[in-house]
C-alpha cells in the first residue's frame, strides 16, 4: 500500500548526521513560517537546540517541546503533543509538526510503544489538514527501527532533498498486529491480587501500600494509585467483571500491571483527546498521561496493561 495524496501527510525523514538533520528540518519549519502555518517542533532536547540555533530570530512563532519529556511515554504523544497543538489552531489552516518519538537510547521496553504510536498517527489524523514529519537517525538506530519507519510512514524523505517517495512497505495495520505481543510474566516472587466490584478499593490500597514500600512517594505514588484505580475499574466494567493486579520494582522503577479477560477492539483507546460530548473512554487516557510508559497487549484470552513509574 502506498501513500495516496491527501490533506494529511506523514513522511519519515532519514538523516545520517547533524548537517542532514538540519537540512531536513529547518527548511520544513521555514516553509511553514513563510506560509503562515502553525508549526511545532517536538524532538529530543539536543535536537531542539540545534533547530533553535539554526532558526535564530525566526524561532519566535514556533512551538518547541522536548520530546524526552513530553513524549517520554509514547502513548501520550498523539493526545498530549500532536492533537493538543493541532486542535488549538484555527480551522482550515494546515498544521505542521516535527515529531521525533524514536531516538537512540530508547529502551527495549519503550520501543514497541513507539512503533505502535507511529502506526496509529495515520488513523488519528486521517482527513486532517496536517503534516507530521518524523526524523530517523540512519547511523545510530537499529536497522529494525529503520525498517519499521518504512512500514509506519506512507511517504519517505531524504535529508539531501528531492521529492518524497511512496513507501512500498507501508502497512501500519500489520505493524500494530506484530507489536501486539504478550508481555512477559511478572517476577516469580510477585503475588497477583484478584479483584472484583466489591474489592476495588482494597486493591487500590494494596497497590499504593506496595508501591510506597518499594520507594514511590508523593506525586508519583498518587499517579500510580490513580492508574490502578482506572485500570481496575475498566476491568470490572469492560473486562469481564474481575481481574488481577501485580506491583513490583525493576531497575529503579515501580511497575504495576492489571490483567483481565476483556478484549480491547479500538487500537486508539487511550490516545484520543478527551471529548466533552463523551463521558466514558477517559480511563486509559488518564493512565497514559500519568505513567512514564504504558505497554498493552490484547488478545482472545484477555488484556494486559503494564505501567512504569520512575522513583
Image (spheres, rainbow, N blue to C red):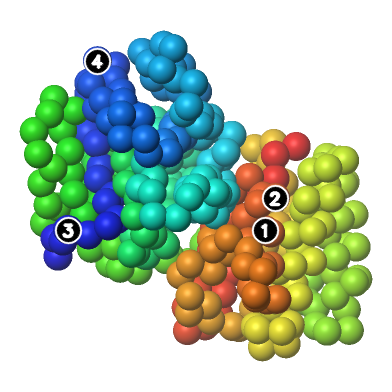
Residue at image coords 53%, 41%: 71
Q: Which mark is residue 5?
A: 3
Between discs 4 and 2, the one toward the N terminus: 4
Along the line of sight, the residue nearer the viewer: 197 or 26: 26
Q: Which residue is mark 2?
A: 290
Question: Which residue is at 34% across, 55% downward?
Answer: 129
- Residue 232 in the image: state x and y as whole percent: 75, 72
**Figure check: 125 above or below 99:** below
Question: Looking at this view, is 208 or 81 the one in front?
Answer: 81
Quadrant location, the N terminus: bottom left
Q: What whole-number distance in Å separates the C-alpha atoms at marks 1 and 3?
A: 35 Å
x and y, in percent, of residue 293 in the image: 59, 49
Q: Residue at x 70, y 76 (%)?
A: 279
Q: Nearer the viewer, mark 3 or mark 4?
A: 3
Disc 2 secondary structure class: helix
Q: Nearer the viewer, mark 1 or mark 4?
A: 4
The residue labelled by disc 4 is 19
Q: Which residue is mark 1?
A: 287
Q: Position of residue 194 (x, y in %)?
A: 78, 76
| Element class at badge 1 | helix
Callout in the foreground (1, 3): 3
Numbered disc in front, either 2 or 3? 3
The residues tagged by marks 1 and 4 sit, at their Cα atoms, a distance apart of 38 Å
Task: Please tell me whether mark 3 sits on a helix, a strand or a loop.
Answer: loop
Q: Earlier in the sequence, mark 2 or mark 3?
A: 3
37 relative to 149, above or below? above
**Circle 3 residues within 10 Å: few <14, some 14–19, many ≥20:** few
- 223 sits to left or right of 132: right
Mark 4 vs mark 2: in front: 4
Amino acid at each position: 500500500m502506498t501513500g495516496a495524496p491527501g490533506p494529511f501527510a506523514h513522511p519519515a525523514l532519514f538523516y545520517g548526521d547533524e548537517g542532514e538533520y538540519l537540512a531536513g528540518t529547518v527548511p520544513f519549519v521555514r516553509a511553514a513560517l513563510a506560509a503562515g502555518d502553525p508549526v511545532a517542533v517536538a524532538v529530543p532536547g539536543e535536537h531542539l537546540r540545534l533547530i533553535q540555533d539554526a532558526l535564530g530570530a525566526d524561532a519566535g512563532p514556533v512551538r518547541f517541546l522536548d520530546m524526552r519529556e513530553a513524549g517520554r511515554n509514547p502513548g501520550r504523544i498523539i493526545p498530549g503533543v500532536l492533537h493538543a497543538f493541532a486542535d488549538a489552531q484555527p480551522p482550515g489552516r494546515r498544521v505542521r509538526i516535527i515529531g521525533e518519538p524514536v531516538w537512540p537510547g530508547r529502551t527495549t521496553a519503550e520501543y514497541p510503544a513507539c512503533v505502535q504510536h507511529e502506526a496509529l498517527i495515520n488513523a488519528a489524523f486521517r482527513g486532517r489538514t496536517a503534516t507530521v514529519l518524523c526524523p530517523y537517525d540512519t547511523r545510530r538506530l537499529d536497522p529494525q527501527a529503520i525498517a519499521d519507519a518504512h512500514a509506519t510512514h506512507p511517504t519517505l524523505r531524504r535529508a539531501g532533498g528531492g521529492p518524497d517517495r511512496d513507501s512500498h512497505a507501508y502497512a501500519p495495520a500489520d505493524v500494530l498486529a506484530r507489536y501486539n505481543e504478550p508481555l512477559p510474566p511478572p517476577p516469580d516472587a510477585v503475588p497477583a491480587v484478584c479483584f472484583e466490584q466489591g474489592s476495588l478499593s482494597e486493591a487500590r490500597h494494596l497497590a499504593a501500600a506496595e508501591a510506597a514500600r518499594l520507594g514511590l512517594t508523593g506525586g508519583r505514588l498518587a499517579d500510580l494509585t490513580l492508574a490502578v484505580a482506572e485500570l481496575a475499574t475498566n476491568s470490572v466494567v469492560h473486562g469481564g467483571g474481575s481481574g488481577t493486579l501485580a506491583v513490583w520494582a525493576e531497575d529503579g522503577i515501580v511497575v504495576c500491571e492489571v490483567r483481565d479477560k476483556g478484549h480491547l477492539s479500538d487500537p486508539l483507546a487511550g490516545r484520543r483527546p478527551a471529548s466533552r460530548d463523551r463521558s466514558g473512554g477517559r480511563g486509559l487516557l488518564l493512565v497514559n498521561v500519568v505513567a512514564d510508559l504504558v505497554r498493552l497487549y490484547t488478545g482472545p484470552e484477555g488484556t494486559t496493561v503494564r505501567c512504569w513509574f520512575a522513583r
